[in-house]
Amino acid sequence: MEEKELVIIGGGPAGLSAAIEARKKGVDVLLLDENLRPGGQLFKQIHRFFGSREHMAGVRGFVIGERLLNEVKELGIDVWLNSVVYGLFKDNVIGVVKENKNIILKAKCIIVATGAIENPLSFHGWTLPGVMGAGACQTMININRVLPGKKVLMIGSGNVGLIVSYQLLQAGADVCGVIEIMPNIGGYLVHAAKIKRFGVPIYLSTTILEAEGKEEVEGAVICPVDNDFKPILRKRKEIDVDLICIAVGLTPLNELLYQAGCLFTYKPYLGGTVALHNADMETSVNGIYIAGDLSGIEEASTAMEEGKLAGLSVAERLNGKSYKGEKIDVLRRLNDFRIGTFGEKRRISKEEIIKEYYERVKD
Amino acid sequence: MIPERVEIIVIGAGLMGCSIAYYLSKDKREVVVFEKGNIASGASGRNGGQVIQLEGRDKNPKTIKERLAITKENNKILKELEKELNFNLEYRRTGSLDIALNKEEWDDIKETVKAQKEAGDREIEILGRKETLKLSPLLTDNVFGARYRPSDGTINPFFLTYGFAFSAQKHGARIFTHTSVKNIIKENGKVKGVELEDGKKVHSDIVINATNAWSSFLCPEIDILPLRQVAVVTEPVAKLPVYPMEAFIEGDAIFTTTQTKSGNLVAGGFRTQARERRLHYDYSVEPVELSGSSAIFKRIFKGIEDVCIIRSWSGTMAVTGDCLPCLGRYPEVKNLYIAAGFLNGMAYGPMIGKLLSELIVYGKTSIPIEIFSPERFYKKKINWPKLYNYTVLAEFFARV
Amino acid sequence: MKDYRIYQHPILGKIPERKKITIYFNGKKLTAYEGETIASVLYANGIRRLRKTEKFNEPRGIFCAIGRCTDCVMTVDGIPDVRTCITPVRDGMKVEFQKGLGKWKKKNW
């Protein structure tokens, strides 16, 4: 059984950032990713990121992704692609299948950064080909360069729904409408403005009743709802679409953490069931750290900062040194992101998680 | 609401406990079941559902007869049970195989079948290599032959346990899960009830210990050893004529496989590392147990390399000093009964419920259960090996 | 012939040059490019129906596109339940529609 210092599971923005930070501090890092190339969901983000210069504002997601990959290469970080972690066993033992070979690893520290999965939404016909996650659609158009449909209905007006709608327009699709069950737009208004300029209608207080079609999506029936979210059936409307995207949130991919025996809590503003962690990003299982969407649904920018935080914490532990200054910088940047109506709620949820960690986890 | 007083307390809501609760409540007795986990959370929910009436290589005519007496009756019950419980059990009489993968095993199987036939077993058969492969074409071509019992089969162990639990409840039994029993209360050589983990006392006339691998915690005078086994399940594969099987690989591991109704192959019993007693309650699976399972699958079936294992788990069975269960009155304590020490539950479960209910209601059983008498191990010290797994125990029993 | 590939994109530019290869879908020849995933090739050709469910015979296609949901599984070179959204194509690959969990085309399974 090979013994490593730090194994990072998941090569998205959190995992890559953690690897870079830990390696810079001299830690021996092995980064595992099940895909053919790392980057997680970063490479399909073709829009410019927000924030200050420090936060790489104005830079497109895939450019950030390329920068991270270059840094990983320059630092000589060991990366295993096509490597599926199938088990997180006792005593920090990891089971990996790498190109059809089973490898058992032991690590002094593990950072799990496996990200999240899109939430489904069930309605009549939701299983038809042509109904997919908004993120799935984004992968198809920006990574695979294939349009999964020409006329689109977007369900959900959060940032993902708005941004992917815009990217569908860029890819040459016709976005027939965005529907949102709440009475107000879920995402940043600047994103909403962009698609409105292209004439994309945003139907508030509206739900979908049905995806129509025999073998694949041929249309949809949308319907306004009343104050109790009940469809006002007489106002239902049929629209001509061949692609329906669902953008109703994400849920952390907790499976490995469940197996490892981590303790969890429930935070609706962070995507639901989230593992308890302390200010160092360490879970209730000694030596297992988390970062990114896995530790709470936020954004790529916060994923990168949390990755850095976890990487620094592990480096502190393995090197027996303190990197307090740099960690404080990271925390400051994280708090900068956690502002505004959405950010504030996430910040509070994160603080509650850390508090609950210290209440429930015995040393 | 947990009652203060009840006629009969059953401890353990596994197959035995629920079966016992069913038969007693059907007979209009007042029954409460206390279960520290969930229904079927012990071995009852972790096995492969094989209904094998005479598992292992028993060559002793006395034990063969007495075991078959119970398991044959059990088989009869199983035939009508879905109707009786009004519950789908996914029970199929597929027959079962004990396959030989080398000459040593083949000789042992032939000897075993001879002994069992001499003891009066009429349905058991020996199949040569060609016939075995005809029945189960996906077995490795290296198979020498097999023991075949046509009336064995497979059942869904969850449905069986739940079927009994729900029917028991319909007849008035109450089941309290997540309610652990700390002690059995005795006074003047008579059972008085139980004390729960939170200190609450529940009084009863009769107590039945049906906690299998945990029974010695409550009844320490009879030493029943926990035995952990690992199991895996594959993705659904084509509908094959797969049989519940036993196979001894290099005398080192029992390996029984079966195929669920949806087509998944379930298998258990891979070689695990010898460990101390308390670690046999540890349900976590080790990576070497997964690779070991894969390796054995490949030795038993041909062309299975690309099939995926989708889940693994472990469970804890129970072993007594002679590998036969303890069933009956607990010595020196009036109205305390025990039904524990099962390595193979599905072939006994329903019948155990019936027998224990007969014992309690009528004072005697319809078929003799003396070989299972708890007295044989009462206050007997067994020098179990400190570190053990199936193989170590097999050697232990061979020496005894 | 339908072609849903995005050849020109305002941000991503021209579609990258890749080696042209051939795959077979239910026996029919399809043009593919090295590096593409199976599902991408099918969707690029307007084929969105990838399989039918066991019980109710319902058509399914991709849903998550990142290998997590298994809605996109098809039988590839005789092996069923392959996640086509993350599996890259190979020259000469045979991709087949599958019903339910499919059938193992190998000798026995």
Image: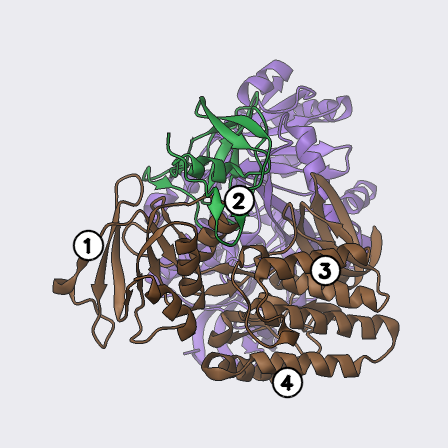
Chain colours: A brown, B purple, C green
Where residue A41 appears, as percent x and y from the top left, is 56, 57
As drawn, B386 above or below B91: below
Image spot of residue A210 (x, y percent): 25, 54
Circles 2 and 4: CB atoms closer than 8 Å: no
Label 4 or label 3, whichever comes before in sequence order: 3
Residue found 77% across the figure and 47% down from its top: B393
Circle 4/circle 1 CB separation < 8 Å:
no
- In the picture of the structure, the residue carrying the numbered disc 3 is A8
Quadrant of res C49? top left
Q: Which residue is mark 1?
A: A238
The answer to whether residue A231 is seen in the rendering is yes
Considering the numbered disc 3 on the image, is that residue within a helix, a strand or a loop? strand
**Disc 3 marks which amino acid?**
Ile
Name the foreground residue: B44 vs A332. Answer: A332
Q: Which residue is mark 2?
A: C14
**Marks 4/3: CA–CA distance:** 27 Å
Name the residue beneath numbered marker 4: A359
Task: Give the foreground label among 2 and 1.
Answer: 2
Say if A327 sits above or below A61 in the image. below
Point out the tag, 3 or 1, that comes first from the N-terminus. 3
Helix, strand or loop under label 1: strand
